[in-house]
Amino acid sequence: MKSKILAGFLVIIIIGFFSGAYVVDETEQAIITQFGRAVGEAKTSPGLYFKVPLIQQANYFPKNLLEWDGDPGQIPTLDKTYIWVDTFARWKIVDPLKFFQTVNNVTSALARLDDILDAAVRNYITSYPLLETVRVTNRKLDTFEVGIGDNQEERITRNISTGRKQIIKQVQEQASPKLAEFGIQLVDVKIKRLNYVEEVQQSVYSRMIAERKQIAEKFRSEGKGEASKIAGNREKELKRITSEAYKVSQEIKGKADAEAAAIYAEALGRDPQFYSFVKTLEIYKETMDKNTSLILSTDSEFLQYLKDYGYSGYNKQK
Amino acid sequence: MSWDWDKLMEQKKSSSGGGFSTPPKMDDVLNKIRGARGKFPGGFKLIILAAVIILLVSSSFYTVDVDEVGVVQRFGRFVRITQPGLSFKLPSFIEEVSKVKVRYVFKEEFGFRTVDPGIKTRYASGPTYESESLMLTGDLNVAVVPWIVQYRIKDPFKYLFRVKNVRTTLRDLSEAAMRIVVGDRSINEVISKREEIAGEAASILQKELDEAETGIHVVTIEMKRTNVPDPVQPSFNEVNQAGQEKEKLIYQAREEYNKVIPAAMGEAEKTIRGAEGYALSLVNRGKGDASRFVALYQEYAKAKDITKRRLYLEAIQEVYPKIGTKYLLDADMKSLLPLLNLGKSEGAKQ
């Protein structure tokens, strides 16, 4: 019987010990409350702690980085384009006591975040043209659009003055102090997705198609132009080559003619009469054949001896 | 008693097998001791004692696989990291171990999901995933950019304790990083410079992940087929096609050029060579003729009359026999001439 009482005592002590001890995990922090009122400092470092059993209660809050996913919604930009923006943020409970007192738990904290961040995002996105939200830097884009309308040119080459990072920073700056009141530190806000709304998307698609068609046309006409250029070049080259060849050959021939003429003149000039005598004989040899009829008169040199043997003709000629 | 053993074995398994296991509630154990006391005095105490010891001992062992490390917490506080192999810790309600696969390369997919990995992997895409990959480019066009992120856990401590939901954080940051990069590129660059985009997105993502203390190392970002939205696709193909057409036209023109010009050049060469031949022959003939004449003349000059006479007669000798018809007319009988029908013999021959 005595041992039974002892055992009962032991059990109560053990239960007391266990309900008084509590563990704070690496990812957690705890606040001890006594009848709903916070007692002492928040326990932010992990380990084993003790509290008064039954009377005191441990309330745990996450210490690590928490997420918030914005409600994606349509937002008009300054240039009246409706876009669909999906944001997310990461936050931490840095002052668990304040957090406990003002919002009590993570779920209601997320509702506050919704209120504050969605509004801030909306505010800033609407105050800038679309391009400012899309782009981050003024990096030069590589596009093959050349010689297109001024409108599109401007769309592509226009520089941004603020950029997404700055806009988001402003959102964060606006929201941070409001969230600090809840013991929340807003680590960062980011745009996860950004898209045209359905109707705008259709017109953007049409524009993209038109843009491409025009580029295609440009390519085609460039091809034709280039081909014509080559064809023209070909014609020209052809003419140049043949005419140059003609020119050169004529020059060569002329020079040769001249040279030959000079040679002949130099040689034949010694005795033109003798030349014509020799040459004529040569021509006789070449031109006379069996189709030729020749009428010879007896007073010719050749037949002078036919009618008498000598002197009359000889003398006559002499 | 057998149900009790089963339960113990189960607890043993769960405490060594995976993650956290709930420590056995002391109350239950005590209740069991009290409740069972009357029925089995003596021997039962021993059994309970043995059971408790087995429980304590078994929850003190754990194995860490080769691709893991064990992260040990004592009363919630991080104390040490253990390497693969069999390790010991204090019993389960004092020390707990979480195992983190630090060598395994994880993968996240954006814009599609692998349905059936294999030799011919099947992918699922659709409106649900399309919103992940649909993004605005710097020239305010719309591109479809699917990609994957491969990552490893480089810091198990940060991975476990610093961020609530590492996977969604990674996914959100990846999407944001990719859109930052694509937002500063034209649609052309998005389609053609995938390597560059993947590289830049990876470096932005890594920076963000480090700042957020996720303990994750990005192994690689791989871009899948970047494209334009389906309705716009045909017009982009048309541009490609037009580009090809342009090339084709140019090549055809060049072909025509190449077909004609070298031939013409050869022809020109031929003309010039012909002229040169003509020139050579003309000059040579001239020179030959001249030398022959000069040689003859020199001899002629020595004896003009006789040479001339000889030349004449030799020519006559050569020419006259070749002549077909010869008429001899006496110089005094000129009246006979009209009687001769000169045309007849010639005409008959033709």
Image (cartoon, coloured by chain):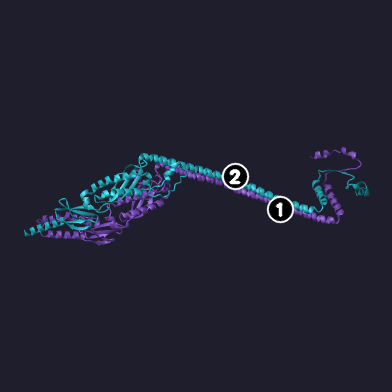
Chain colours: A cyan, B purple
User: Is A261 drawn above or below residue B57 in the view shown?
Assistant: above
Q: What chain is tagged by disc 1? A: B
Q: Image point 81% across, 55% down: which residue?
A: B296
Residue B179 percent location from the top left of the image: 36, 48
User: Is B162 drawn above or below residue A298 in the view shown?
Assistant: below
Label 2 in the same subunit as label 1: no
Mark 1 burial class by Cα count in 10 Å: few <14, some 14-19, many 20+: some
Label disc, if present, on residue B201 of the rendered structure: none
Q: What chain is tagged by disc 2? A: A
Q: Nearer the viewer, mark 2 or mark 1?
A: 2
The number of callouts visible is 2
Residue B185 percent location from the top left of the image: 41, 48
Q: Amino acid at mark 2?
A: Glu
Q: CA distance from mark 2 to mark 1?
A: 33 Å
Residue toward you, B139 or B342:
B139
Mark 2 burial class by Cα count in 10 Å: few <14, some 14-19, many 20+: some
Q: Amino acid at mark 1?
A: Leu
Label disc, if present, on residue B280 of the rendered structure: 1
Q: Specify whether B213 is left or right of A287.
A: left
- Residue situated furthest left in the rendering: A1
Element type at marker 1? helix
State whether residue B347 appears in this view: yes
Residue A104 percent location from the top left of the image: 21, 49
Q: Specify whether B41 is left or right of B286.
A: left
According to the image, label 2 marks what residue? A235
Query: Marks 2 and 1: CB-CB under 8 Å?
Result: no
Q: Specify whether B209 is left or right of A148.
A: left
State whether residue B114 appears in this view: no
The quadrant the N terminus of chain A occupies is bottom left
Element type at marker 2? helix
